Amino acid sequence: MSAEYRVDLDAFARNLRRVRDAVAPAQHMFVVKDDAYAHGLDVLVRRAWNEGVRWFGAFDVVTGAAVRAATGPDARIFVWLIGGADDLAAGIAADLDLGIGDQALLDDLAALDARDVARVHLKIDTGLHRNGIRPEAWDAALVQTSDLVAAGRARFEGIWSHISEASDADDDDARALFLSAREAARTAGLEPRFSHLAASAAGFARGEFREDLVRVGAFSYGIRPTGGPHEAELGIEPISTLVATVTAANPERVLLDVGSLHGLPSALSGRFDVATPAGPRRVEAIGLTSLTVAPWDAVVGETVPVFGRGALASATDLAELIDTIGEEIALRVSPVVPRTYAGQLG
């Protein structure tokens, strides 16, 4: 394989500073699911820690434990994909903050060894239906949580939810439900230390949504939202480039090794250009591990940026051509493609 995924860690650090300024006085929870959006978990987490990030959103318990190994004991690490009692026990053992969006998990927690004390963030379903406790079940969940706290089995840390970011009106309705759920928790004697509702887009655009923590993944990596403001408007920059290598060339076509077992979506065939030494050339066909590109006087071994930093198209530029999101394009870079890093490591 001759392709590589180049990551600029200094650009990443600039994005982190931009995020921190944009969401202040809330704290940035840096989301690192899917191997830090395919950029390499360990390196990105270590650099983020050195840049002052203290909250990490790790999605699942296995990823959370990996973040704990990279950061040491002082980071706060939030996970929210929890499969049951075994996941709860592993999360507690790794000293993770646990996002509870299912009443059955409260039952599982009550059945664990009495020495296990969980840091609990209850999730209210504000209408997105991406798990979360339904409003009609919220009071019962508060009773369960109060019992766990009284028994010394849990510490009540926070209330959280997701919003759709589909429209301001939908998000306003979701926030109203979120605030009502928080007030009900306070009435039940559960005072959250942390509230978190917003992710990247709302965290930047709507100050009233920021609360105590803002979960920002995509913007940290310089991936802008589909159909939204450009990177320059947001003050962020792509941090990575998929670089392909010429493996064959003739007067009819040039073949590029992209090294990705997942491939780019075939729907992008014939729809975007790559930057070559001879100028832009159209990508004519997309294979599992290669691209066929319109010809130029190419030399085997020559490198070509496919998308990302320094390329003609960002991940979101490509995503917008086929009605998806930039994260989906970034995550197609296979884990077997070597990651190379410029700038200060963690």
Image (cartoon, rainbow, N blue to C red):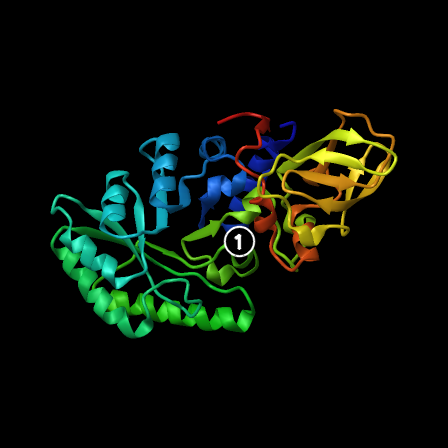
Q: Position of residue 133 (x, y in %)?
A: 32, 66
Left or right of 96: which side holds 151?
Answer: left
Choose between 287 and 301: the one closer to the eye.
287
Lateral position of residue 200 relative to residue 228, left or right: left
Q: Residue 309: name its quadrant.
A: top right
Residue located 39% across and 31% down the image: 70
Query: Callout 1: 10 Å neighbours few (<14), some, many (20+)?
Result: many
Q: Considering the numbered disc 1 on the image, is that residue within a helix, a strand or a loop?
A: helix
Can residue 296 be seen here?
yes
Residue 42 position in % (x across, y down): 45, 32
In the image, what residue occupies the spot 60% across and 38% down?
Answer: 260
Residue 308 seen in the figure: no
Q: Is residue 10 above or below residue 314?
A: above
What amino acid type should be assigned to the residue bearing mark 1?
Ser
Q: Quadrant of residue 187?
A: bottom left
Q: Nearer the viewer, residue 43 or 260?
A: 260
Percent x, y for residue 117?
19, 46
Residue sitting at x 51%, y 59%: 207
Which of 76/162 is in front?
A: 162
Q: What residue lies at 23% left-to-right and 65% top-to-bottom?
A: 142
Residue underneath mark 1? 200
Q: Position of residue 46 (x, y in %)?
A: 45, 31
| Side (left or right) of 109 relative to 321 | left
Q: Compared with residue 261, is residue 157 higher up or lower down, i.e. above or below?
A: below
Q: Nearer the viewer, residue 328 or 185?
A: 328
Q: Quadrant of the N terminus?
A: top right
State the count of labels.
1
